[in-house]
Image (cartoon, rainbow, N blue to C red):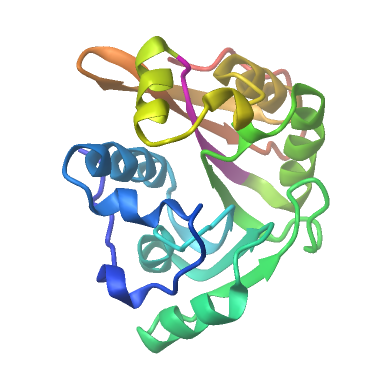
Amino acid sequence: MPESLILLPRETYPKLGDSDPLRFYYLPVVGRLYRERVERTLQELPGGKRVLEIGFGSGVALVNLSKKYQRVDGLDLDSEVAPLEKVFRGQGYPVHLRNGSVLKMPYPANSFDAVMLVSILEHLKPQELSAAVKEVARVLKPGGRMVYGVPVERPLMVFLFRVLGYDIRTLHFSTEKDVAAAAGKHLAALAIKPMTFLGLHIYEVGSFMKEAKRGRSKRPVR
């Protein structure tokens, strides 16, 4: 079973705008799906000294990450850093958050034991994916792990997005196959695991490793 996502009381989080999906995590059915995709991604992280979450958003994974790693860094394009750091540091979780892009990250090479991305890579265009994964590989230590979660587009997924008020075509530009292919160009594949809902494959979590010496990537185990 995946580890349970530890959420702070909803009112604790600063309001980040109408596009912030935080409210969905607290809903009965939809909330279960939102939480589970994060939980399954967290499950693939082995723990260690330092982790980077790319696209931390409202910070829903930061508590769990703080319990698995000695230092937690976060990078996000537009989330407000200061209010989130104040909240989490006030709760005893001294996270280190910054604004920036996965395509050009403000970290030295070989900085992190793990990099986590939940529902981020599908928002990149296919031609950007390889550059993004190459940059992730750069900041990972040898033996470090990239773990990502991406939706698998199916009619049910498109319908759920419509129910939530979103047009999936304006948000997602790459498929789960595009993401896995890009990851395999720069990292060694460990596993790709499906997440199902009502028997349908709607999400998957990929785990890839930075090898000390680049070898030939094995086909990921699905």
On the image, the x and y values in percent for residue 127 come to 82, 24
Quadrant of residue 6 within the rendered picture:
bottom left
Q: Is residue 23 left or right of residue 46?
A: left
Q: Residue at x 51, y 62 (%)?
A: 17
Q: Is residue 190 above or below residue 112?
A: above
On the image, the x and y values in percent for residue 209 come to 61, 36
Res 163 seen here:
yes
The secondary structure that dominates the magenta segment is strand
Quadrant assignment for the C terminus: top left
Q: Is residue 71 above or below residue 56?
A: below
On the image, the x and y values in percent for residue 96 come to 59, 75
Quadrant of residue 175 within the rendered picture:
top right
Residue 53 lies in magenta, yes or no? no
Q: Residue at x 48, y 57 (%)?
A: 18
Q: Nearer the viewer, residue 111 or 194?
A: 194
Magenta-tinted stretch: 144-153
